[in-house]
Image (tube, rainbow, N blue to C red):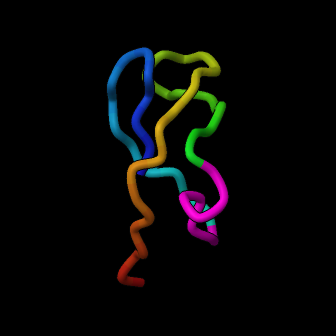
Amino acid sequence: MLKCRECGNTWKLEVSFPLKKEFKQLFHYCPYCRRNTFHDILEYVESGD
């Protein structure tokens, strides 16, 4: 789960490994701001599939 530092929205980024083990923040496109912003990595959530 990521939280955008600009708008504060929390959303799920589909990746195959836990980002939090490697990084504290991520510079990524925010679908709510519609621009690249810094995001805090909150947690790794595994899907139930």
| Image location (x, y in percent) of residue 31 | 50, 28
Quadrant that contains the C terminus: bottom left
- Who's the residue at 51% across and 33% down the image? 39
In the displayed structure, 20 sits above or below 41; it is below
Give yes or no for residue 21 being in the magenta stretch: yes
Nearest the viewer among 34 and 2 is 2
The number of callouts visible is: 0
Give yes or no for residue 43 being in the magenta stretch: no
In the displayed structure, 48 sits above or below 1; it is below
Outermost residue on the bottom side: it is 49
Q: Residue 7 falls in which quadrant of the image? A: top left
| Image location (x, y in percent) of residue 13 | 52, 51
- Who's the residue at 40% across and 36% down the image? 3
- Who's the residue at 66% across and 59% down the image? 22
Magenta-drawn stretch, dominant element (helix, strand or loop): loop
- Who's the residue at 63% across and 51% down the image? 23
What stretch of residues is rendered in magenta?
A: 16-23
| Image location (x, y in percent) of residue 24 | 56, 46
| Image location (x, y in percent) of residue 41 | 47, 47
